[in-house]
Image (spheres, grey):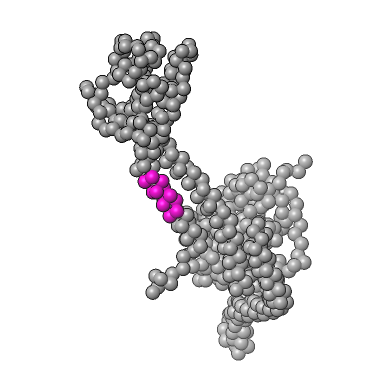
Amino acid sequence: MAARNRKVPLKRRTSLVVILIFCIVLFFSGVVQFAFMDELYIYATQQSMVASAKRITEINFKKDDYKSILSDIEVNRDVYIEIYSPRETLFYTTDSNDIVYEPDENNTQAELKPRIMKIISHKELPDGSYFEMRQEHYTSSQYMVYGVFFGRNNGIEIYRSLDAVKSNSLTASWAFFVTTVALSFILITIALVYANSVINPLLIINEKAKRIINMDFGETCPPFKIKEIHELGENINSLSASLSDAMSELKSENRRLEMDIEMKRRMEKTMRSFMANVSHELKTPISIIQGYAEGMKVGIGCDSTEEFCDIITEEADKMNNLVCRLMEYLQYGTENYRVNKITFNIAQFITDCVDLRSYRIKEADAAVSVAIDEKLYGYGDTELLSNVFNNYLSNALSHLDYERKINITCRDMGAFCRISVFNTGKQIPGTDIENIWQSFYRADKSHSRAEGRFGLGLSIVAKLQELHGQKYGVINKENGVEFWFDIEKTNPPK
């Protein structure tokens, strides 16, 4: 039952029907041509021989042009002619037409010899003429012969090679078959093109109807050449427009409501996450300050008051640093923040940034190498870009390991320059590499607090690069990690 109820697409069904008709036409064409063409061609040859004999009977042999007339008949009709006068005396053959006797019953000379053949079949016609099938004695060649009597006991026999007839018949059969195939192919092509001109618009209309069912009113049916199909398409378009107008206002309101709800959810989620992270970061130094202050109050560690004060001061500095970083992070995220772009030499810019961190580099026992073409110039806010680079350099110093090398390079990428900061050390795990650009996210949580890092540096990098409209990223290398950021390239100042 499932096979019976299966629906066949209209285009496939039409193609199958056209191909079936093509096969049927070819089959019957082949049957007719190769089964009956010989008979038809023999019949046509016989009619041609009858016409040739009739033309010969009309010749006036007393005129001088009879030879040319006979020669034309022999050449044009591809026949062999024998003329007898009287019936038993041969006075003309195709092989030798230089001796010709007037058809006279008193002429008894017989200097020409007729073709001697074995008669295979004989058919007498009502008018006294006859058709025969003859074969040469020493070969298998067969000939069609037509004989007719005219005048005063005169006779004509016209020969036509049966092999030539069959050869011409076969050639004609193949020619006709090839022509039939070509014409059939052309007709099928025309039929398929016309069928597609009807089917394709219906498929388009059907697809449009499916879109309307799914509440998609974006596309309309194009104009069609066939009147009835064009009217159907216009009706579908009108229906689509009516439904679209009826639902557009409701969808618009729903979209606005969904956007407001989603924005509110995101803001609430962001705010909860931000406040939780801030509270978490402030909780530790506050607890430490509170603990040491209470200890001093009750007299614990009286001999270590100076040490306690140093610890309280250190934790207060960390809190101040966190607040400053938070203010910086929030500042870069405001819409009113403006970037002050200038043209600068990239090599000099990087050198200055590295020099400012020379003490930290020496303290970390790091081997820093800088390889930057001095001819490269960038265009951007150097204050913000120095913040980006310093975050990368601080991050590299914090995670330095193995050979303790830091390689700083700059590649010319055409429209921009890519600055890379590579440090030897452990790679960033795959679970962390996608999240390191989020605020308060720290891949290495064991040393972050001791070094005064709060997970805001890379998130600040992301915001600063977005302000510049440039890309940034990180790549795990074989023996370390490479952070990179792009700077807009420009020409040196004149």
Considering every residue shown, the one lying at the far left of the view is 138
Q: Is residue 214 above or below residue 474?
A: below
Residue 91 sits in quarter: top left
**Can residue 289 be spotted in the picture?**
no
In the picture, the quarter occupied by the N terminus is bottom left
Pick whichever, 81 or 56, lies toward us.
56
- The residue that appears at 76% across and 43% down in the rendered structure is 493
**Can residue 159 be spotted in the picture?**
yes
Pick whichever, 251 or 444, lies toward us.
251
Q: With 427 as the anchor, is 457 left or right in this view? A: right
Principal SS element in the magenta part?
A: helix
User: x%, y% of residue 24?
Assistant: 41, 52
- The residue that appears at 35% across and 11% down in the rendered structure is 107
Q: Is residue 15 above or below residue 31?
A: below
- The residue that appears at 71% across and 66% down in the rendered structure is 332
User: x%, y% of residue 38?
Assistant: 35, 37
In the picture, the quarter occupied by the C terminus is top right
- The residue that appears at 65% across and 49% down in the rendered structure is 416
Q: With 465 as the anchor, is 168 left or right in this view? A: left
Pick whichever, 25 or 236, lies toward us.
25
Considering every residue shown, the one lying at the far bottom of the view is 298
Residue 79 sits in quarter: top left
**Is 310 inside the magenta-drawn segment?**
no
**Is 31 inside the magenta-drawn segment?**
yes
Q: Which residues are magenta?
A: 19-32
